[in-house]
Amino acid sequence: MTHAYAHLSSILPSMPQAVFVKDAHSRIVMMNAACEALWGVRFEDVAGTDGGGQVRPEELSAYQARDRRAFDTGEVVVVEEPLSPTGLNETRWLLTHKRALYDAEGKPYLLIGSCIDITERKRKEAALETTLRQTREIAGHQLSAMEGHRRRLALEAQDHLAQNLAALKLDITMLHARTASRQPLLHERAAQALATLDDSIDAVREIINQLHPATLELGLSAAIEWQLQQLEKRHGLDCRLLVRRDGAVLSTEYASALFHVVRTGLNYVCAAASCVQVELNLQSEHLAIVVQSDRPPRTPSAEEALTLQAMQERLGALGGVLHITPRSLHISVAT
């Protein structure tokens, strides 16, 4: 072991990277100048100690736990760890490698460690995370505003346009009935107007449902069930809804945003499919929605890829993720 100490003592000073050596009790027995500069301490002040008093107690405890792991397993322990030396009044982040050495009897007697300063990288990561969080918050506010705007437009269309069309249809229906025997030309024109009004009312209803289906006021499950019924009527698909749990309480805007994501997902999986199923597991802490079909596996087209990307971004604004398979979409959101 004396030879090992001498060998290490001869090579440590010349190494540009911060290197330290501890004994089997995690006491510091060697460190080079690069390590002194990085740790903000002098070797003569910590020699023969475990570093207590130089760093925070919780950090020291974590360092020693990793020392024990290296001694016990014989593995190279690699970890990113904070260092808050009392002499620097700042926290640095280190990428540390630790490896144990053993004597002829297999007992640990030295721990060789090296450190790289990754403080700047961690600061950039923290800044990026802050930016991403703020971006998600802004996107979430924008999404809430958009969903609220959709709902207001739908309600205004229902209260004014749809009701006015319904009143107009009632008047023309009465005109159509009164002119049946005495004014055949006007009767025919009234019938044409009624047909046009029916088409207009259907179009307005479709616009309202695209903006904000009335069933959303009953909850997300009810709105998805209604959407599946529409798919059955329009495309002749076999649509099934499986509700595992429905205990989540969602705001109208939140439910509306999720509904539009699910509806987009349904449009994606319905292509070339004959059977579609939506599985809902809506818990108070976590929402899981699976949209799947029997469509043939294929690579999404360029247009579909853009649609899926838009879904992912919309879910990201809600704090959720989207997992895509050839036949299904898995939506997961923590509430």
Image (tube, rainbow, N blue to C red):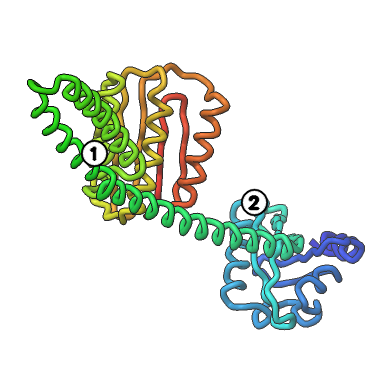
Position of 244 compared to 318: left or right?
Answer: left
Q: Residue at x 14, y 28 (%)?
A: 176
Q: Which of the pair 118/83 is nearer the observer?
A: 118
Q: Residue at x 27, y 49 (%)?
A: 160
Position of 278 compared to 307: left or right?
Answer: left
Position of 170 compared to 108: left or right?
Answer: left
The residue at which mark 1 appears reads as 243
Figure check: 261 above or below 236 = below
Q: CA distance from mark 1 to mark 2?
A: 51 Å
Query: Which label sits in the foreground, 1 or 2?
Result: 1
Query: Percent position (x, y) of residue 65?
Result: 58, 64
Query: Percent position (x, y) of residue 73?
Result: 60, 52
Figure check: 306 above or below 235 = below
Which dot marks residue 74? 2
Query: Percent position (x, y) of residue 70?
Result: 63, 56
Under circle 2, the secondary element is: loop
Quarter the C terminus occupies: bottom left
Q: Which of the pair 279/32 is nearer the observer?
A: 279
Query: Percent position (x, y) of residue 187?
Result: 16, 23
Within 10 Å of the Cα at label 2, are there few (<14), some (14-19), or many (20+) other Cα atoms?
some
Q: Amino acid at mark 2?
A: Gly
Q: Residue at x 19, y 20 (%)?
A: 185
